[in-house]
Image (cartoon, helix red, strand yellow):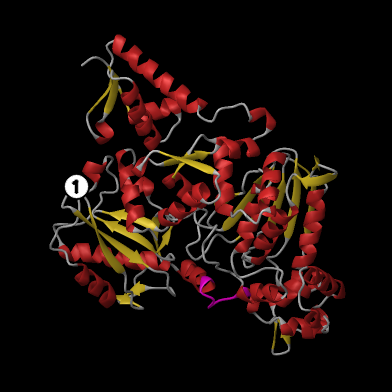
Amino acid sequence: MRSLLEVEAILDQLEDQTAEELEGQDLDFKDWDANSMDKALRTVIDWAVCMANGGGGTVVFGVADKVRGRASAVVGVPPEVDVNRLKLAVYDATDPKLTPVFEELRVPEGTGRLIVMQIYPGLPPYTDTKGRGTIRVGRDCKPLTGTLRRKLAVETGESDFSAVVVDAPPSRLLSAAAMETLREVASRERAPADLLGLGDVELLDAIGVVKQARLTRAGLLLGGSDAAIREHIPGYVWTHLRLASDTDYTDRADGHDTLTVAIGRLLDRIHADNPIQTVRQGLFHFEYRTYPEIALREALLNALCHADYRIASPILVKQFQDRIEITNPGGLMGGITPENILHHTPVTRNPCLVDALVRLRLINRSNLGIQRMYTALLIEGKEPPSIVDLGDAFRLTFRASKLSPAFRAFVAEEGNRGVDLSVDQLLILQHLLRHPEIDSPSAARLCQRSQEEIREILPRMERDLGYLDRGGSGRGTYWTLRADTHARLAAPGDLDRDRRTDWEAAKTRVLSILRQRSERGEPGMSNKEIRAITRLDRNQVVRLLGELRREDSHVKTSGYGAGARYFWGDA
């Protein structure tokens, strides 16, 4: 959900984008029907149901979603509309009952007020009192069909494929080799010794995958034989492809092993083509793989734990020369999106299986797997993984980024002085190594944080840790790397590069273009046109033009908002 401060910041982007383009899984804008209160109430109810089924979110009423330009898009909600009436209408017309929070947001345009409806996550499915319902999927509200109702049942734990009992004696299903591999892997993760000392069936019973003296599918996935897995979980198979191009592979392997065996086999195959770089630091030599093992292991665990085993599709690992793609059947659930996955509350498709792995200490419940992937890559100066929700599948990609010895040494030095860099701080530092500056909205999107959270993170990196310098003021505030921090982080070839070079070059180029256009008698340029030339964002262009106007009295502006134009002249 979005706070009022975040909504205000988003409204500023309406100058150059429509509200529809700014919408997402947890955010929508709706015009208010001033001609019919009944239709307006129906819209509020429908959107409350849609967002509740989609994991919660924010709906802003009073904004035309297909209109560009803030002054035209922000129409507002009539002053006589009572938020208490809206809350009562939603409560009376929904089943189970929904109680959204309605907030007023004052704006200078239109009627002067917007109404923001906040829908908190609950236990779907929700419908209206006539049984009609929709669910938020991306930017759309889809009819709550049987397939989507089943998906909701999985997300809420009402339907757990991995908890279904297999009707056969456990002794016929288990593999001694698989059970010993399970014990070995759990022992490395320091699972309780008394737990691992139990017999095979007793161990599986203790971690919750035996019910009524019968093995569950989760138990099969942890200790079953290949033949038993093929018979009782026919949708499960893993495939590893080594590709020479997007269409041709040179090597292939498939398996129906238990999860711990599968991870070991997949890692062995990946590491066969996972180059090692040796870095000398003092008297020691450290070895780093192109794809860190921690990141690979977490990604494979994630794919195997959250796969939808009802779908006859492989857990597919495609290894290219420049990347590794890991895809599992079953898309993201419970309101999780690629844009919020870093800090979202964990949601699992297979609770019985996940609970067992937690007890074995192979995973945790705190959604740390994604953060561990990010951290393992970022501390080596590499790109974080890219994540794509394909609807009925989930894909995670690691790029073959180069190791940055300077960045790795910086992280180690900071750790020695008691500073454990968070994922947010690593993302910001990596961004600033590639870009001259960052502002709060950009940092919020990068770190998948709210504006309030990022306004605590950036000042701490400036004030307490001494990594950043602050510039500008108000909404124009931005942060850059301090010179000494840049010297510690940058590769040797980049040390002489001034971080302000690109900024000053952009100013010089824009000033030159404005002068040339004036000499040719051509009109000035808009913010959007200048962005296309400089590759800066909207706020950066505003600040750049502000600096030019202070430095050169000939730089002037006319118009307002999206219609503003900048030119050079004496008038």
- What's the residue type where badge 1 is placed? Glu
Q: Position of residue 556 (x, y in %)?
A: 26, 23
Q: Position of residue 387 (x, y in %)?
A: 58, 51
The residue lying toward the viewer, choosing from 267 and 425, is 425
Q: Residue furthest bottom?
A: 212
Q: Quadrant of the N terminus?
A: bottom left
Q: Position of residue 434 (x, y in %)?
A: 57, 36
Q: Which residue is mark 1?
A: 109
Q: Residue at x 29, y 24 (%)?
A: 566
Q: Against 144, is 479 above or below?
A: above
Which residues fall within the magenta stretch?
155-161
Residue at coordinates 29% horizontally, 48% vertically from top-left?
65
Residue 346 located left or right of residue 477: right
User: Of residues 327 and 169, which is closer to you in this image?
Assistant: 327
Residue 220 relative to residue 310: left or right: right
| Marker count (numbered) | 1
The quarter holding residue 44 reads bottom left
